[in-house]
Image (cartoon, rainbow, N blue to C red):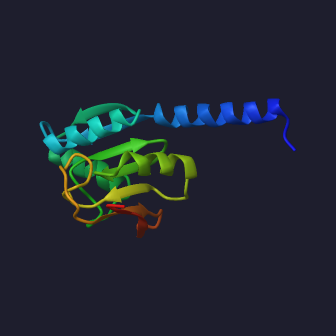
Amino acid sequence: MMSKRTTFLAGALALLSTAALAAETVEVFSTSGCGCCIGWMKHLEEAGFEVSNDNLAMADLHAKKTGAGLKPGQTSCHTAFVGGYVVEGHVPAAEVKRLLAEMPDAIGLAVPDMPVGSPGMGESDEPYEVLLVGRDGNSTVYARYPR
């Protein structure tokens, strides 16, 4: 049986861990003036993330994607890095937080293309998937939206 002090300390640690995850800085690379990228960054900020943005020429952005290990069919309009992972496209902030909490052996998450209804892409009930991209480049479904 846990003492009141142990229970309090465990709860405080859990809160601090959650706050630390939310305060993580997400480094976003995109092309200049992309409205949906701006919308996604705002979504992350509203979820408690710090966000930095570097606008790149398309060739340089493509090099970031391939350098991170992403394959054709796994890419979108922007590429981000957080906690040692790549986050490609319009990944919901909840899944980024889950990734950082679970720390799977993977290169990161991807929402390929630009599905309507994903964060930054407007409202819709169109289904889309968040993929977990493994170190071998293969992907598995990490989450499905809408829930």
Q: Where is residue 33 in the image (x, y as percent from the top left)?
A: 12, 36
Q: Could you say which is closer to the camera, residue 137 or residue 52?
A: 52
Q: What residue is at 23 percent from the left and 61 percent from the top? A: 125
Q: Position of residue 135 (x, y in %)?
A: 48, 62
Q: In which quarter of the image is residue 107?
A: bottom left
Q: Position of residue 131 (x, y in %)?
A: 38, 63
Q: What residue is at 37 percent from the left and 50 percent from the top? A: 87
Asked if residue 27 lies left or right of residue 21, the reply is left
Q: Quadrant of the N terminus?
A: top right
Q: Could you say which is closer to the camera, residue 70 or residue 3?
A: 3
On screen, 147 above or below 3?
Answer: below
On screen, 69 above or below 97?
Answer: below
Q: What residue is at 48 percent from the left and 45 percent from the top? A: 84
Q: What residue is at 16 percent from the left and 41 percent from the top? A: 31
Asked if residue 95 lies left or right of residue 36, the reply is right
Q: Could you say which is closer to the camera, residue 29 or residue 14?
A: 14
Q: Quadrant of the C terminus?
A: bottom left
Asked if residue 18 lies left or right of residue 82, the reply is right
Q: Where is residue 64 in the image (x, y as percent from the top left)?
A: 30, 48
Asked if residue 132 lies left or right of residue 122, the reply is right
Number of residue marks: 0
